[in-house]
Image: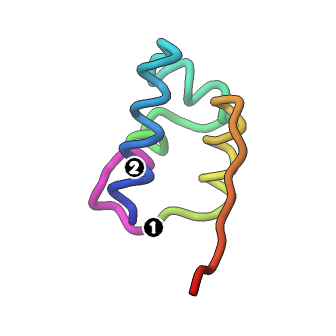
Amino acid sequence: MECVIAWQIAREMKAQKITRTEMASRMNTSRAALKRLLDETDTSLTLATLASAAAALGKHFRLELAA
């Protein structure tokens, strides 16, 4: 799941032409923290970080359990 989320965020950043520096600034975080978010192997993502990334991209983060 982490790789899909990282890929979606990176894809949206590219589509909106948002640099890593700008994205980190929009999220009020460091570039190092953003690098971890975009790392497909990092499993330490928090819901708060994902929500912050979504908001920085003008999107909403939705998590649901499905049968």
Q: Which circle marks residue 32 in the picture?
A: none
Q: Residue at x 68, y 52 (%)?
A: 61
> Which image quarter is the C terminus in?
bottom right
> Which image quarter is the N terminus in?
bottom left
Q: Residue at x 39, y 49 (%)?
A: 36
Q: Position of residue 47 (x, y in %)?
A: 64, 63
Q: Residues within 10 Å of mark 1 (few under 14, many from 20)?
A: few
Q: Residues within 10 Å of mark 2 (few under 14, many from 20)?
A: some
Are dots 2 and 1 in contact, CB under 8 Å? yes
Q: Nearer the viewer, residue 43 or 31?
A: 43
**What is the magenta segment's predominant secondary structure?**
loop
Mark closer to the chain start, 2 or 1: 2
Farthest residue toward the front?
67
Q: Secondary structure at mark 2?
A: helix
Q: Nearer the viewer, residue 31 or 57?
A: 57
User: Is residue 26 toward the left or the right of residue 42 in the image?
Assistant: right
| Residue bounds of the magenta highlight | 37-43
Q: Which circle marks residue 36 in the picture?
A: 2
Q: Position of residue 48 (x, y in %)?
A: 69, 58
Q: Nearer the viewer, residue 34 or 2?
A: 2
Farthest residue toward the bottom?
67
Specify whether residue 4 is painted magenta. no
Q: Residue at x 67, y 27 (%)?
A: 26
Q: Residue at x 53, y 16 (%)?
A: 16
Q: Secondary structure at mark 1?
A: loop
Q: Position of residue 38 (x, y in %)?
A: 38, 44
Q: Which residue is mark 1?
A: 44
Q: Amino acid at mark 1?
A: Ser
Q: Position of residue 53 (x, y in %)?
A: 61, 41
